[in-house]
Amino acid sequence: MRWIVCADRLDWGLIGLEVAERRGWCGDPVVPEGDELGFVGCAEDLDRSHLERRLRSAGFDPFAVPTVVLSEVDRSEPDRVRALVSAAGARARQYPGARPEHLKPVMPRVASRRSVLAFMRPIYRSVPHPDPGACGAADGCRACVDTCPHGALEWSNGVVTDDRLACEGCGRCVAVCPAGAMIDPRFTPSQLEAEIGALVHAHAAPTGILWHCSRGAAPDPTPGWHGVAVPCVGMLMPHWIIGPLVQGAAAVAVAECNCGLESDSNGRAAAAVTAARQWLGAAGIGDVAARVQGSAGAAPLRGGLPIRACGVYGAHGAAILASALGAAVWDGDLAPLGVISIDQETCTGCEMCATVCPSAALVSVGGDGNLELWFEPSRCTACGQCVDRCPEDGAISLRRAVDTAELGVGRRRLIELEVARCVKCGGSIAPQAALHRIASVLGNDAALIRQISSVCLDCRGTTMVF
Amino acid sequence: MIEDTELARLRQGCYRVLSAGYGRPSAERVEQIGAGMAALAAMGLDSFAYSRPLWAWVEALQGTPVALLATEQVRLFGSGVDGALVAPIESQYLGVNLQGDPARYAARIEDIMRRAGVALRTDDRPPDHLLVELELASALCGSEASERAAGGDGSRWLEMQRELIDVMARWIHRFASEVADRDNCGALAALAAATEAFVIHESDMLRLLLVETGGGSQ
């Protein structure tokens, strides 16, 4: 990657990076032709929206071009500058590209003497949009809709539609999507992983990672710590908070959110931090308070954990992390894994739970004269869609827990139900339990109950049972 | 800063250039499209995210032999519904399963045309053909720009544009995907992608403009 750098405030000879220095670049960001460009500017001088327009004019996708904005503290440490530049490059290489649905235009209105209305030239924010190929909405999943604090998502006829202008980009839908289908192109799991990996490995000394909200002001830099932006800290799940530790970071903290767009962001982040500490404690990580700190620099940084894992920010990241951290049993409301159990007496075998399960943790298997429901705990993200959609009270329950013993058992059969056979063709009608349930609803219409229980749908038009 | 009238003219020009892409290809038309894009660039096109797909289309268009483009256009879009592999017609995407739906969608466009005081010159294409819809949107933007230049807020025209574009935004993605799957020359896939990017942007832009003129809510 070719880096164009501002040469006004920094002696790049000391940094030791191969860069093209441009004096006054921040004030007039000229974008040259070519691919694989990156820019380093100064927080004091660079107008990002102006740079975005220049990039677009030159044929670049502004989200794809890494731009590092250095503060005074950053510029004082050559190591830090190298880490920031390599992390921005690593992140940019993972950029998946944005579709038109990912772009939210923002055009502030301004006063104009010539016209009734005038607008600032637009800036674009990335917003999450579901990948229809991976989204489970068609089967009834609406985990993202349920979590959106701005009412920007709507489920209708098996499709999730998003209102870009209502979306504030808090990222909660990205974090809860059990299928990893909700994508914000600027904050994909692989981008975060690449950025954190580069930041941690750029330093020989222990490094702390500070999660912070991308929409508010970035926190003041702390020596030894690097900030990593997420849409908002209110989206952070316990396994995201722990994630940097298994990438080599010595400690993690979450910066207070000051964007003010959701009132509960800091409360959610604090709860996730507590949950992360509980999980680490349950896994026998002794110095939990030093690893997950209340704020950046709250305690001296020590060496990293001797545990490594990748893929912890993805849809199945919690299961990956649980395997990496080792034996633990931790039950909690924010546990990102779940254990499903089914009540043998109440379940009718309607298969709604298996149909709606967006991560294929619950699947139904039709056997010879029976129906089985199978559960794979490592795929369960505790989204609760199966419990929400179950038509029978108490038939299915979810225990939110990281339980490595359960993960170790692996795929298991939860229930096996006998399926009634058609008296005419021998084909399947429905599980006997479902037919009993139907009979209890129909009450005393014995003829109808016999008909429904004895003949399959295909034969029902031509066969009567008396 | 961009004045409201300039913005309406820019959007009018974008619709116009895109609709030209769905017309019969010729060397002259390709040249006109290039000139149109240059004019749009001078009006501030590059400030908007849809400029990249538009430029990508023009680049693909200028690099494709006109004869190949013409063949591919007939193969994909056809001269009528029967001959089209990917008919650029709204009712083909939104309403073919319900009796009378094609007529309902065409009638919707005709109703907007009637209220806007414009009419189709020929019967070559149905009113809900993409080219016709883009031309109509262009005309509505033109009326909006004129009204704004005269000191009005253009909200009547914005409401009509929104009626038109909100429905287009529901099917344009499927159309663009199908063209991308089937286009052999690349230029038509790029055209459909540019149209999709612009229409989706417009559905947001119109809401923003309506809020600013007091004629709608976000």
Image (spheres, rainbow, N blue to C red):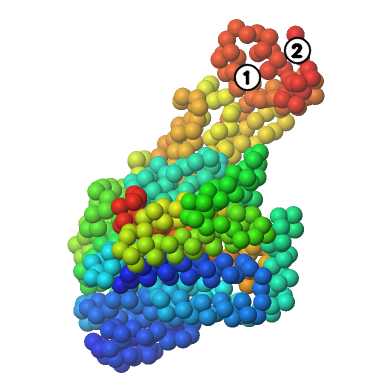
Q: Nearer the viewer, residue A308 or A293?
A: A293
Residue B5, quarter of the rendered image: bottom left
Which residue appears at 44% of the width and 44% of the height? A154
Residue hosting label 1: A435
Q: Is residue A22 above or below residue B60?
A: below
Residue hosting label 2: A465
Task: Compare marks 1 and 2 and give the one earlier in the sequence.
Answer: 1
Q: Chain of mark 2?
A: A
Residue B24, quarter of the rendered image: bottom right
Image-based side of A28 in relation to A299, left or right: right
Image-based side of A10 in relation to B121, left or right: left
Q: What amino acid does circle 2 point to? A: Val
Residue A56, quarter of the rendered image: bottom left
Report the quarter where the C terminus of chain A lies.
top right
- Please state the horizontal and vertical placement of residue A66, each as a whole percent of the image: 39, 75
Q: What amino acid does circle 1 point to? A: Leu
Q: Is residue B187 above or below residue A212?
A: below
Whether residue A29 appears in this view of the structure is yes
- Please state the horizontal and vertical placement of residue A130, each as a whole percent of the image: 49, 53
Image-based side of A216 in relation to A431, left or right: left
